Image: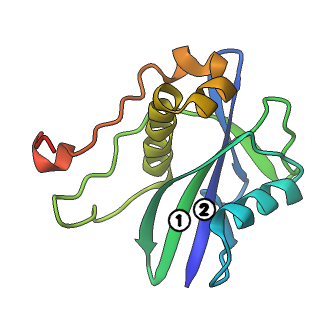
Amino acid sequence: MQAIEILPVFLRKGHLWSLCPEHADSFVVAWPVGAQPEKITEQAMVHLGMQPTVLHSTSWRQAGKELVLTYIAVVPPSSVPPPSWQIVEIARSELARGDATAPPSSIGVAQVQEHALRHLAWLRKDDPAIARLLDGWSLVLADYVPEPFRALGGLAL
């Protein structure tokens, strides 16, 4: 089995907010074999009435017998989620840590979202298209610092 987890986020009045179903940790959709995950992700967001301005695959993990591919979806601050969804201010979270050859024993959605926002912060600095789209995000993403290869003890590649 494979699934796509979508983490919709937006910036409003200098704060980051996430959108998620009221009775679930995150928004997960089926990912049919052979389908392009970015198309499935965009279609799911559009179906909810929210057009993402940025979609970026940030991670994958094994959840039980399922492979879960996670996308962060930046949506306009005026986006209105379905009535059964909640809007929650994003809080910082410690990343899930494994070791150099094994994943963490457990990974929570808040940890996945933290990782995704670190990706977004890196892309905002490195990718001109993302930088243009997230022009007003520099302050709110300033403390989200990617830590590549931390599990390898600072090994420089």
Residue found 73% across the figure and 64% down from its top: 39
Compared with 22, 135 (above or below) is above
Q: Which residue is mark 1?
A: 69
Percent coordinates x, y for residue 95 in the rendering: 34, 45
Q: Report the Cα–Cα distance between label 1 and label 2.
A: 6 Å
Q: Nearer the viewer, residue 22 or 107?
A: 107
User: Could you tell me the amino acid type at mark 2?
Assistant: Glu
Q: Nearer the viewer, residue 119 or 48?
A: 119
User: Could you tell me the amino acid type at mark 1?
Assistant: Leu
The quadrant in which the C terminus is found is top left
Residue found 42% across the figure and 67% down from its top: 61
For residue 5, the mark is: 2
- Splitting the image into 4 quarters, where does residue 101 fall? bottom left
**Of the image marks 1 and 2, the number of the one nearer the N terminus:** 2
The reply to whether dot 1 and dot 2 touch (C-beta < 8 Å) is yes
Percent coordinates x, y for residue 143 in the rendering: 41, 22
Percent coordinates x, y for residue 149 in the rendering: 21, 46
Structure colour scheme: rainbow
Q: Is residue 16 left or right of residue 46?
A: left
Residue found 34% across the figure and 63% down from its top: 106
Compared with 120, 108 (above or below) is below
Residue found 73% across the figure and 67% down from its top: 40
The local crowd at label 1, few if under 14, some if 14 to 19, many if 20 or more residues have their Cα within 10 Å, is: some
The quadrant in which the N terminus is found is bottom right
For residue 100, the mark is: none
